[in-house]
Image: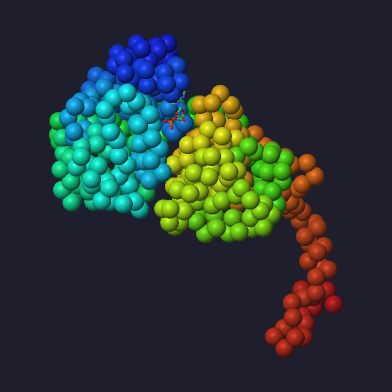
Amino acid sequence: MSKKQEKPSQGFADFGLSETTLKALEKVNYETPSPIQAAFIPLALTGKDCMGQAQTGTGKTASFILPSLQAIDDRIPATQVLVLTPTRELSDQVNAEAERLSYGTNCRTTSCVGGKDIRRQINDLKKGAHIAVGTPGRVLDLMSRGVPALWPLKIVILDEADRMLDIGFRPDIEKILRRCPDKRQTLLLSATMPPPVERLARRFMNDPDRVDLSTTNVAATTVEQFCVTVDREKKFSLLTRVLFQEKPRQAIVFTRTKRGADALYKRLSRKLKSQIAVIHGDLQQRMRDRVLKGFREGNIRLLIATDVMGRGIDVSGVSHIVNYDIPEFCDDYVHRIGRTGRMNGERGRGFTFVTPDEGDQLTNIEVRINGLLTPYTVPNFEAFTPRKPYDPKKAAEEREKAPPPPTRNGRYRRTALAARVV
Ligand code: AMP
């Protein structure tokens, strides 16, 4: 069954949430439900399986945490809700949101991610943390160690399902879902709904209700999106010019590879001595945490990131996104752009650098977002030298002028044509 998004005319009080939850919402200053919350919360509260198409930055975390809180019996010390996320950073973020929204209850939450002390996580689960938020690898590890508190689950949530499948978590997710009780509610959130996500849903969800929320429109209304055609060798100069011209409050610059991110960081930090950092999956967890903390607190203003790491960044101060390398997949474009213009009423700005041979990727993005990126120019800077159109007459003249190719022993070879002219 498919349900179209309705206009969010309801307030949180109309959803039948508990008094304690309404007070917690007041405390965090959430006055009006965001569109995904207005559409998803009432469906999830029915106890049915639900799928929602929404990206980070639209308030999707609360849309599954709030219904979960209504289902939890906080007098029973057992894990009743499991949230799976693609990255450790996103797990920590969801965990923090769950803590904030469960204010006033006895509900306890824990983050089960790799790179952090597993004994503490086992301890938390054994003591019966009500909500466990984690990455599939670590959660599976905990389940395999027979951490008993994970079993009486009522709700399983797959957050950013598309990204979890992209980065190869399918086998782990399937193993986890097979170990979860059959009688459970499964909620799935995803920015995009490609066939692998649909297949996962068909296999592990029970006739789910759907919320169709066009993510592209959300991004388009809150982010101004530009493109600049640039020669590959001028990308770095263009970046410095754009940063100088735009003066971002905080910016994320995306590269396609970890090595590219490191190289750009090295080059840029020679120009900008402070407030710049790089984040990617090869960095140690401690370093990743430190960088994100610095970015969240505003001490870092320019962050160079790869796609996977960029996903976990929920910082409302991000005013600019720069796609230094055009994303390989157009869905990544939507995710990258979604890091700005995040629910604080301010419009973000997104810039995509396109080299002359990347026209196809640009077209794919424009088809995906159903709109055109606006060309952007930097005054007095020629980012792209247009190829001269082919002029057969001029080409023939240049051929005439050029000396004949040398022979192997260095002497000019008289071609048949040259011989005839002579
Ligand atoms: P999310 O999409 O869950 O990552 O949320 C993006 C940001 O919006 C987070 O900083 C949330 O705290 C905030 N947020 C979520 N729901 C609301 C709401 N109804 N009103 C105001 N802010 C919200």
Residue located 44% across and 16% down the image: 32
Residue 138 x, y percent position in the rendering: 28, 49
Residue located 77% across and 76% down the image: 404
The front one of 49 and 1 is 49
Of the four image quadrants, the one with ligand 1 is top left
Residue 370 shows in this picture:
no
243 left or right of 394 in image:
left
306 left or right of 324 in image:
left
190 left or right of 336 in image:
left
Residue 217 x, y percent position in the rendering: 50, 26
The front one of 417 and 285 is 285
Residue located 65% across and 38% down the image: 248
Residue located 45% across and 17% down the image: 31
The front one of 205 and 74 is 74
Q: Quadrant of the C terminus?
A: bottom right
Residue 402 shows in this picture:
yes
356 left or right of 146 in image:
right
Residue 41 x, y percent position in the rendering: 33, 21
Residue 86 x, y percent position in the rendering: 36, 44
Q: Tell me how many marks there are.
A: 0
The front one of 417 and 135 is 135
Q: Is residue 28 above or below residue 132?
A: above
Q: Quadrant of the N terminus?
A: top left
Using the rendered view, name the quadrant where residue 261 is placed.
bottom right
Q: Residue furthest bottom?
A: 409
